Image: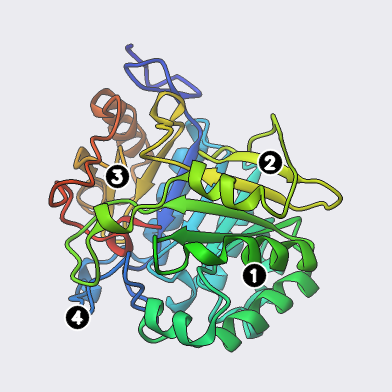
């Protein structure tokens, strides 16, 4: 489908409207989660990372092309110096409906209020286990007490919604799904369970052996909770259920067992300025090269973004039985 420069929306060749941009502000993180990173990571030289001004410029171009939701991610976005000022600038874009953030929670105890004041409406916090020892094993460097304090700080700050994200691995943390939902219910927040995505080569486990499907999680949860399906969506791939007797919604992100590509509405900007058209493919356009070759030229940037829609693939090709086709880790992709 051909789209002109005057178009107010981005439409790919499969007729899907892109109205959601995920922006990685850094590939660095203070954790080393087993499913996200190798234990010894090599990070981008700082000169290769977009400046905060460049990120803001690109976000404004997307907003003018009909993007109404921007999620700031990493790595861990809150380790990036100046990220609060960037959130403030993006939050000032009048046409945005939502500015949201994904974080590991390690910095929230001291930053939650500033994030809320900057204009962030919703926040997602990674929490894969409530067990202190297991948390250390899964994250390699993280301290769960710090994250739990961060969750409480986020609740106190008064975000519109707070959601936990839990990647579930068989025989690592799958036994905790009921405990995690009960924790969310007790805190009055939401939770999503995520099937592991095969990005990057890891040595901690075999992904096929550790795979735990969303339907298995639902079966486990049915032993303790009654869940009723909800029709509402948040612009993401989750299918949501309401916990009976509570306000907590439980989401399931199932890239393997319930492929959601046909409704894909997002693209990703990596920290080094690549526009990734698909999480599970390498189709991309170098926006950093464009804006550094044509400083301040919004028209050229917008035309490049429009043209990029022509190479957005129909679907990902994840295969848990093989080494990953995508060698970049999730931390380099933008979680």
Residue 185 vs 9, above or below: the answer is below
- Sequence-earlier tag: 2 or 3: 2
- Quadrant location of the N terminus in the rendered image: top left
Helix, strand or loop at label 4? It is loop
Q: In the shown orientation, is residue 109 left or right of residue 228?
A: left
Tell me the crowding category of disc 3: few under 14, some 14 to 19, or many 20 or more residues within 10 angstroms, Cα based: many
User: Can residue 282 be seen in the rendering of this structure?
Assistant: yes
Alpha-carbon distance for marks 4 and 1? 30 Å
Location of mark 2 (residue): 241
Location of mark 3 (residue): 275
Considering depth in this image, is 208 or 293 the residue closer to the camera?
208
**Quadrant of the image occupied by residue 292:** bottom left
- Image point 29% across, 24% down: which residue? 314
- Sequence-earlier tag: 1 or 3: 1
Location of mark 4 (residue): 40
Q: Are marks 1 and 3 in contact (CB under 8 Å)?
A: no
| Between marks 2 and 1 in the image, the one whose residue lies nearer the viewer | 2
- Sequence-earlier tag: 2 or 1: 1
Q: Which mark is residue 115?
A: 1
Q: Are marks 2 and 3 in contact (CB under 8 Å)?
A: no
Q: In the shown orientation, is residue 100 left or right of residue 320?
A: right
| Between marks 4 and 3 in the image, the one whose residue lies nearer the viewer | 4
Looking at the image, which residue sits at the far right? 245
Residue 199 coordinates in the image, percent (x, y): 25, 54
- Sequence-earlier tag: 4 or 1: 4
User: Can residue 95 be seen in the rendering of this structure?
Assistant: no
């Amino acid at each position: 489908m051909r789209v002109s420069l005057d178009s107010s929306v981005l439409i790919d060749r499969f007729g899907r409207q892109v109205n959601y941009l995920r922006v990685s502000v850094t590939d660095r993180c203070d954790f080393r989660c087993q499913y996200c990173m190798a234990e010894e990571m090599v990070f981008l030289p700082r000169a290769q990372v977009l400046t905060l001004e460049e990120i803001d410029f690109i976000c404004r171009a997307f907003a003018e092309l009909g993007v109404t939701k921007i999620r700031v991610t990493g790595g861990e976005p809150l380790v990036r110096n100046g990220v609060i000022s960037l959130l403030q600038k993006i939050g000032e874009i009048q046409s945005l409906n939502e500015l949201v953030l994904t974080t590991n929670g390690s910095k929230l105890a001291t930053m939650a209020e500033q994030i809320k004041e900057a204009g962030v409406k919703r926040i997602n916090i990674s929490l894969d286990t409530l067990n202190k020892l297991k948390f250390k094993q899964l994250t390699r460097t993280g301290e769960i007490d710090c994250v739990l304090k961060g969750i409480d700080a986020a609740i106190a700050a008064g975000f519109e919604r707070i959601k936990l994200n839990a990647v579930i691995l068989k025989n690592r943390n799958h036994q905790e799904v009921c405990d995690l939902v009960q924790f969310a219910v007790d805190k009055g927040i939401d939770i999503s369970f995520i099937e592991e995505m095969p990005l990057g080569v890891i040595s901690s486990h075999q992904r096929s052996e550790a795979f735990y499907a969303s339907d298995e999680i639902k079966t486990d949860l049915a032993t303790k909770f009654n869940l009723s399906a909800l029709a509402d969506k948040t612009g993401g791939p989750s299918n949501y259920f309401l916990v009976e007797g509570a306000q907590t919604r439980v989401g399931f992100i199932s890239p393997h067992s319930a492929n959601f590509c046909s409704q894909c509405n997002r693209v990703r900007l990596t920290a080094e300025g690549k526009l990734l058209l698909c999480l599970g493919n390498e189709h991309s356009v170098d926006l950093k090269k464009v804006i550094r070759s044509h400083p301040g030229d919004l028209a050229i940037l917008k035309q490049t973004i429009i043209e990029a829609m022509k190479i957005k693939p129909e679907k990902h090709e994840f295969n848990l039985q093989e080494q990953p086709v995508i060698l970049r880790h999730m931390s380099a992709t933008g979680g």
